[in-house]
Image (spheres, rainbow, N blue to C red):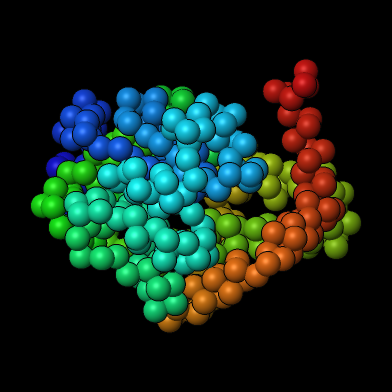
Amino acid sequence: MAKINFGGVEEEVVTRDEFSLEKAREVLKNEVVAVVGYGVQGPAQAMNMRDNGINVIVGQREGTPNWDKAVADGWVPGKTLFNVEEAAEKGTVIQYLLSDAGQRSLWPKIVECLNEGDMLYFSHGFSVTYKDDTGVIPPPHVDVALVAPKGSGTSVRRNFLAGSGINASYAVHQDHTGRAAERTIALGIAIGAGYLFKTDFRNEVYSDLTGERGILIGALSGVMEAQYNVLRKHGHSPSEAFNETVEELTQSLIRLVGENGMDFMYANCSTTAQRGALDWHPRFRDAVAPVFDALYESVVSGNEARITLEANSRPDYREQLEKELAAFRDSEMWRAGAAVRSLRPENWQK
């Protein structure tokens, strides 16, 4: 492992230099990796591994849109595409990539398919950490591990095709074979991880649920909407409000942060922007800190898990989800955003 200094704290990480794709192929040469669930992470991880020469099959319920998507992506029914239980029986590594609610629902069937020495693989610590709510308690005769890409399945695939990768955490929860760590790291390299950093199931889910509800999605969309509404209230046009709130962030500033950090972005803004941002930064930080404290406590207590499982298990879940997403899509702010995006130079000829 490589030792990297992260802000003054030295951590061990796994890079492709010391654990190459060739080594991953050697570790996995006798494995059949069954990707169970072809929704968010499943397609990207399955196709990346297939492209990297790993023996992969997919498990998905026949007759669903995701089954059709798998067929369109080149998985062949009866050869590399099977129903969920059949794929789980054939696999020596079962990548359990259904939704968290789906994992709870299908667990009684999946657990019966786990053979001596198999690996049960997750990309989220949810089901195992909140076992009292999910009932997911792995049997003692299998390895249990996770590799959690720090990005959506779409980004995992796009970055892979671009010759890059998405950083990922990894954890071994149960080592029955004595090979769980090398199997896990090999799988992380095979799905195209940029580098791998160590965690455990509990820390992964606590940080993940906090991040998703916080800065990555919930807080980001919330503060965007708040600023947009203030600008509109004071007479700014939709195009001006959206450009100042979202477009400049996504098309310019966040890219600078991604390249070289927040200080680099600050250094490449006007002196007026620098002064104002430095003055207002602590006020925003202090204002939202209590919200983040409350969010983290809700995650740790299991409240967020219970809300998620209850909502996502309802028979009308997808219909209700579409209504909630439509509220974003049909709002003035995001309709203005669609118009702004259509005017980007790269879209002029589309």
Q: Residue at x 56, y 70 (%)?
A: 308
Q: Nearer the viewer, residue 273 or 72?
A: 72
Is 22 rendered above or below residue 226? above
Is 164 on the left-hand or right-hand side of 333?
Answer: left
Q: Is residue 81 above or below residue 309?
A: above
Q: Furthest residue to the left?
A: 178
For the image, the number of numbered tags is: 0
Q: Residue at x 53, y 39 (%)?
A: 154
Q: Is residue 193 visible?
A: no
Image quarter where the N terminus lies is top left
Is there any visible trace of residue 170 in the rendered image? yes
- Front-most of residues 339 and 19: 19
Instruction: Give left or right: position of 176 versus 239.
Output: left
Tell me what residue is drawn at x 21 percent, y 34 percent: 30
| Residue 138 horizontal side relative to residue 318, left or right | left
Percent position (x, y) of residue 161?
Answer: 46, 25
Closer to us: 305 or 210: 305
Q: Which quadrant, please, contains the C terminus? A: top right
Question: In the displayed image of the protein, which residue is found farthest to the top?
Answer: 349
Q: Residue 120 in the image: x percent, y percent?
A: 30, 54
Rendering coords of residue 93 (x, y %): 30, 46
- Residue drawn at 42 percent across, 46 percent down: 86
